[in-house]
DNA sequence: AATAAAAAATTGTATGTTCATTCAAGATTT
DNA sequence: AAATCTTGAATGAACATACAATTTTTTATT
């Protein structure tokens, strides 16, 4: 097998510059308005450069969506590290899905356009599946120790559905802020739990906090 | 003012044929794969004809989305006519938002791509706003007579959010059928209502059924 | 009814635009 | 001077739209 060529410093820098430029354009114009020319212009480079550092537009976009997902995932992770009870972990997961810096209309639209594109783009679909799997796994680790399996499954679904719905509503211009979104989901959780279950979630750390 | 020319029979027929053809292509390929050529081919006509009956592609697409919305709205309406208690009406609204004939992956994707496009297309945005307004108004007419204003508002929001989320999940290929979707929302409603409120909704028709 | 004239409907091609991608040439760094 | 990086223009594909030519339907006239 061919020894993979060691990356130049510049190559790494430019790739990141282009990915971040694409991300900025993406957040404003969505997937539809994302042209190679615009990305390069945003990065302050000439239009041909994109093909030099990426296999093509699709390749660059894919890296950009990964970059976007990583930001979300890290927000959740950093919040999880501060949580000690399952209930705090639950809250951390929900809050992490509405980052203060990203829960706005352009971002919601951008995310929506990726969901729509996932229908015909296997790479996007894979990223999305991975995203959902992580969310389900995170929620499950909080709920499973306290709730019966079917209740756990149903809450994982309904919380996931509400997160999606709240992002979609944001994309349509709904007058919702991060706090309202989180509150709605927390209220939904509380309504679906018995007092005893709530106490169990709040009172004891069913798993080590840094698992 | 000019007397509006009476429409030829053929003109009406062709417009509907083209709209329905567009709708079929739309359901399979989403907004992205919707080209004038494909629409005309699907209708069994030649590529130039679209410009004859519509101002352009955008015009045809707009009519097609309206057509799509009308199908949904009529499903809800016909169910509402059969309902006599507020609870039945509530259920009718929820079920009407997941028509047996349309809650499938292609349709969900198509709908998603319209939501994404609404970000940059004022016409789509207007249709969408109208759609949400009707949903909120329908739900409100059931809940308002029984619940305090803030509870009503919050349930209108959460049910709407769940409907959106369930469609979005469907678009990503989630293994959900119509029944599961409806059940999830009904369960959410029940969890959010006190026994007395549930009884009030089930027991008396707070408004005439055909209002 | 028959026929001619006009209007409407339809076709298929041509045109222009947008955009991703390619590449030869030039600039910069190693 | 060799390797790497960058440019800007050229190429070509996909597509909406415009339109001249042709066919079909309707209307008017005898």
Image (cartoon, coloured by chain):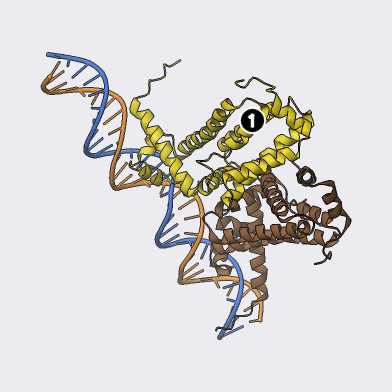
Chain colours: A brown, B yellow, C orange, D blue
Residue A88, image x, y percentages? 84, 55
* Chain letter for the residue marked with disc 1 in the picture: B
Query: Would you say residue A104 is visible in this rendering?
Result: yes
Of residues B55 and A196, the one nearer the viewer is: A196
Q: Which residue matches tag 1?
A: B88
Residue at 63% in and 59% down: A65
Residue at 72% in and 58% down: A72
Residue at 67% in and 27% down: B86
Vertical comparison of B9 with B110: above or below: above
Residue C29, image x, y percentages? 66, 76
Q: Is residue A207 left or right of residue A71?
A: right
| Quarter location, residue B120 | top right
Tag 1's secondary structure?
helix
Vertical comparison of B150 with A157: above or below: above
Residue at 69% in and 60% down: A134
Q: Quadrant of the C terminus of chain B?
A: top right
Q: Is residue A62 left or right of residue A104?
A: left
| Quarter location, residue A82 | bottom right
Of residues B121 and A80, the one nearer the viewer is: A80
Number of residue marks:
1
Of residues A165 and B58, the one nearer the viewer is: A165
Q: Is residue B36 left or right of residue A106?
A: left
Query: Would you say residue A44 is visible in this rendering?
Result: no
Question: Dot 1: within a 10 Å radius of its alpha carbon, few (fewer than 14), some, or many (20 or more) residues?
Answer: some
Residue B188, image x, y percentages? 71, 41
């Amino acid at each position: 097998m061919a020894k993979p060529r060691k990356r130049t410093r510049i190559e790494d820098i430019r790739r990141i510059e282009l990915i971040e430029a694409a991300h900025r354009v993406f957040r404003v114009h969505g997937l539809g308005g994302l042209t190679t020319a615009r990305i390069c212009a945003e990065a302050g480079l000439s239009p041909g450069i994109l093909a030099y550092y990426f296999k093509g537009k699709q390749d660059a976009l894919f890296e950009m969506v990964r970059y976007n997902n990583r930001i979300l995932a890290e927000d959740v992770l950093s919040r999880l590290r501060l949580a000690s009870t399952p209930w705090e972990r639950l809250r951390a997961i929900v809050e992490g899905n509405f980052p203060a810096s990203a829960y706005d209309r352009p971002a919601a639209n951008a995310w929506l356009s990726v969901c729509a594109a996932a229908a015909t783009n296997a790479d996007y679909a894979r990223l999305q599946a991975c995203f959902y799997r992580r969310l389900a796994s995170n929620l499950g680790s909080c709920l499973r120790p306290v709730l019966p399996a079917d209740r756990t499954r149903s809450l994982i679904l309904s919380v996931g559905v509400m997160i999606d719905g709240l992002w979609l509503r944001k994309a349509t211009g709904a007058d919702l802020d991060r706090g309202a979104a989180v509150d709605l989901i927390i209220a939904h959780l509380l309504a679906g739990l018995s007092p005893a279950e709530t106490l169990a979630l709040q009172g004891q750390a069913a798993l080590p906090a840094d698992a």
